[in-house]
Image: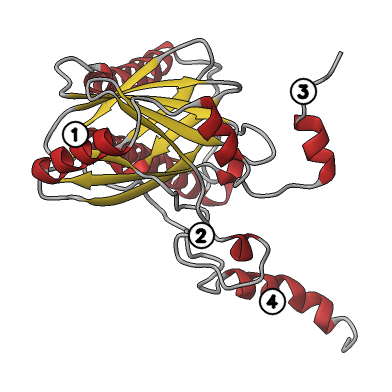
Amino acid sequence: MSSRLPRLLRPFLFLLALSHTNAWADYALNMTKGVSPISASAHHLHMTILWVCVAIGIVVYSLMIYALIRHRKAAGHKAAAFHESTTVEIIWTIIPFIILIVMAVPATKTLIEMSDTADAQVTIKVTGHRWYWQYDYIDEGIGFFSYLSTPEDELNNLSPKNPNYLLEVDKPVVVPVGKKIRFLVTGKDVIHSWWVPALGVKKDAVPGFINEVWTLIDTDKPGIYRGQCAELCGVKHGYMPIVVEAKSEADYNTWVAEQKKEQPASPSASNEEEKFVLMPPCDDANDVLNKPVQS
């Protein structure tokens, strides 16, 4: 018996290890309310549907438990001798239909709101590359690439991980608060997905197509908001963080003026090739796979 005890304890030790704070550092039970009307609407819709489902579950399981207890054979009850009931079938068809219609109203309203990119005050084109992002401010005429900036020692486990491990970039995308921002999302090579939970934004970046999405950050919530590529796009999919820095309108205008002085209208191919060298290393096999085939 004593020799079997360690084996029996293994599942409990495994659960104990998972309960450690480091293992659950990024664990959450619910959606974030975010900092934009879109994220707030999505969260409100989510909670509304959740409580509708909870209410349905309580009613269904209560009736089921009541029937099992009160109509059990031990209590002297006998099963009814009918094969089907048209009335019951009509009731359990009509009630779910009504519930779905009631749920569809707020869901449709939220989806229409999320797709309405009209009257945008700032337009930013987002292009997904393997494995970095490119941002072009259409009206301002500026653009740049955004690359992972996590130190190489952390990537190689030679130094402790910082709180924003794999969620930090050399150049964040800067946006103003209190203004409607439209993102034109596309891909250069494979399908990516531009996802920033706090903004309520998640849109696929598909080569050859331009998808639209918008956000508006509350005026009282400037700050830094992080996200990452949410579509498996290759060996370095985990090295495509997104950092959005929300500034006041005055600070944003100052940043735009500085960018116009410091860089050309759009990043050049030579800059792209130079920056690509700074991407995290991968093994020789993956390097071979990523090289173009020579005829």
What is the crowding at mark 3: few (fewer than 14 residues within 10 Å), some, or many (at least 20)?
few
Task: Give the image location of residue 123, x and y in percent.
Answer: 25, 23
The tag earlier along the polypeptide, 1 or 2, is: 2
As drawn, 156 above or below 9: above
Q: Nearer the viewer, mark 2 or mark 3?
A: 3
Q: CA distance from mark 2 to mark 4?
A: 27 Å
Residue that carries the numbered disc 2 in the rendered image: 165
Q: Is residue 48 visible?
A: no
* Amino acid type, mark 4: Leu
Residue that carries the numbered disc 1 in the rendered image: 216
Q: Is residue 201 visible?
A: yes
The tag earlier along the polypeptide, 3 or 1, is: 1
The tag earlier along the polypeptide, 2 or 3, is: 2
Q: Are marks 2 and 4 in contact (CB under 8 Å)?
A: no
Q: Nearer the viewer, mark 1 or mark 2?
A: 2
* Amino acid type, mark 1: Leu
Q: Are marks 1 and 2 in contact (CB under 8 Å)?
A: no
Task: Give the image location of residue 147, x and y in percent.
Answer: 50, 43
Q: CA distance from mark 2 to mark 3?
A: 31 Å
Q: Nearer the viewer, mark 2 or mark 4?
A: 2
Per the image, label 1 sits on a secondary structure element best described as loop
Which label sits on residue 13?
Answer: 4
Q: Nearer the viewer, mark 3 or mark 1?
A: 3
Left or right: where 40 falls relative to 211? left
